[in-house]
Image (cartoon, grey):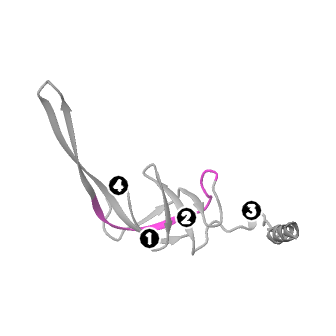
Amino acid sequence: MATETATKQTEEKTTPKEAVVETPAATKKAVTPDGFSVIETGGKQYLVSVGDIIDVELLGEHEEGTKIEFDKVLMTSKEVGTPYVKGAKVTATYKELHKGKKISILRYKAKSNRDRKLGHRQKYSRIEITKIA
């Protein structure tokens, strides 16, 4: 009796699922307007979607409200690039220059009366993702 219920439970769990139909690569869209993308900038990768506000490495001299396009798109919600997705672009608006948290660095050498205190505060560009195309 116990073996019959165990086999029924395993049969129920292993029911066949719907077959996934692949479409040719030529008919796939590069990027969907409502999804996510992984972009590369400043040697780092960021997972972004429309409306996100992120801090990235400095992008150069920009004024507030300037449009910036990222063409190094590694992945979208529909496609994975090799290494980049062809024709995909992410558009962002430059918000402001933002400063990170201040860190203190203390270097100390014992028995030689030597110490040195340094500080560092990283600067970032704050951007808002406006369009994924």
What secondary structure is marked by label 1? loop
Q: Which residues are magenta?
A: 82-99
Check if mark 3's residue and mark 4's residue have beta carbons within 8 Å.
no
Residue shown at 42% from the left, 51% from the top: 42
Q: CA distance from mark 4 to mark 1?
A: 17 Å
What amino acid is labelled 1 in the image?
Answer: Asp
Mark 4 vs mark 1: which is more N-terminal? 1
Q: Earlier in the sequence, mark 2 or mark 3?
A: 3
Distance in Å between CA atoms under marks 3 and 4? 36 Å
Count neighbours of disc 2 (C-alpha within 10 A) and say few if under 14, some if 14 to 19, many if 20 or more.
many
Q: Quadrant of residue 113?
A: top left
Q: Identify the residue at image location x=79%, y=65%.
A: 22
Q: Dot 3 lies on which element?
A: helix
> Residue 81 or 106: which is nearer the viewer?
106
Q: Which mark is residue 25?
A: 3
Q: Which residue is mark 2?
A: 37
On the picture, is 9 further left or further right than 29?
Answer: right
Figure check: 120 above or below 76:
above
**Amino acid identity at mark 4:** Leu
* Whole-number angstrom distance, CA of label 4 to CA of label 2: 20 Å
**How many residues crowd mark 4 within 10 Å: few (<14), some (14–19), many (20+)?**
some
The x and y percentages for residue 23 are: 78, 67
Q: Amino acid at mark 2?
A: Ser
CA gap between label 3 and label 1 equals 29 Å
Nearer the observer, disc 4 or disc 2? 2
For residue 58, the mark is 4
Q: Mark 2 or mark 3, which is nearer to you?
A: 2
Residue named by callout 1: 52
Q: Position of residue 122 (x, y in %)?
A: 28, 52
Answer with left or right where residue 84 lies relative to residue 21.
Answer: left
User: Is residue 84 rendered magenta in the image?
Assistant: yes
